[in-house]
Amino acid sequence: MLLNEMTWMEIRELLPQNPVVIQPVGSTEQHGPHLPLQTDILSAYEVARAAGERTGCLVAPPLPYVYSETWQTFPGTISFKPQTFMNCVSDIAESLVRGGFRKIFFLNGHNGNLAPLQTMIFQLLERYGREGEVLIGAGSYFMIAQEACAAIGDSFSDGTHANEFETSMVMQMRPDLVHVDRLGDWVYEPEFFLSFREGMTSVHKLPDSSRHIGVFGDPRRASQDKGRRYFEACVARVAEVVENFDPEYFGLGGGS
């Protein structure tokens, strides 16, 4: 059910059922020469919608502006500063809790959101989670389903931005937005600028649009059939999380 298509009285009638609210968050940023700027938020929202239809949970309007400073030199990218994004997450959660919701799931579609989302979740739990009455979680749809997706194609082995996985996903959801004619002439060599190794995080440099096409991975291996299977795997795993959205499922103990 889509939250913004309901009246407040209809929502009030649902509150005694303690429904989960999925809040999709993504980005408006470059995704190479072949994918639209809305790739991340489109994927998160469509996965959320499908999981909502499967589980009966509520899906809030998507948040399409997040932390995207990585791609600041690529025209069209719109970015919040980290604190701005965190404030948005906080305000959304506070509004939902104030309205009577007790289970909120931020479904992420953009790698750059992971650190600020985790930080904000800790702060929200400091505010609402002491008594265990409010459960707020966050997860990336592609990480939740990583094992299932790895059995389908390259997914994350060759990069995670505008790659085979994301290109296949958009081919499934909005094939009209994929410029397949632009896939043949580029050399897809990874230029990693952010590293997570041996417990350390390091940033070497940010990609420059004057010499980088904005793709990590090889989208030429993408297909609509892979996209269909990726999408179904992601929806199934997100639906499982929603259906089991309680402390025991997350290994936290206590009551629901």
Image (cartoon, rainbow, N blue to C red):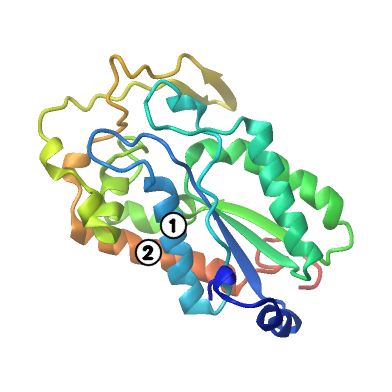
Compared to residue 97, the image places residue 71 above or below, namely above
Is 104 placed left or right of 199 in the picture?
A: right
Q: Residue at x 67, y 48 (%)?
A: 89
Please state the horizontal and vertical placement of residue 216, each as a whole percent of the image. 32, 31
Label 2 residue SS: helix
- Label disc, if present, on residue 145 of the rendered structure: 1
Q: Viewed as shown, does residue 163 lie left or right of 252? A: left
Residue type at tag 1: Ala
Confirm or deny contact between disc 1 and disc 2 (CB under 8 A): yes
Q: Which mark is residue 46?
A: none
Q: Which mark is residue 233?
A: 2
Question: Dot 2 surroundings within 10 Å: few (below 14), some, or many (20 or more)?
Answer: many
Position above or below: 7 against 98: below
Which of pointers 1 and 2 lies earlier in the amino acid sequence? 1
Identify the image quadrant of residue 207. Answer: top left
Q: Which residue is at a point 47% across and 55% down the rendered structure image?
A: 141
Residue lying at 21% horizontally and 28% vertically, measured from the top left: 188
Residue at disc 1, secondary structure: loop
Residue flagged by tag 2: what amino acid is it? Answer: Ala
Residue 180: x %, y % from top left: 14, 44
Name which residue lies at 45% across and 24% down: 72
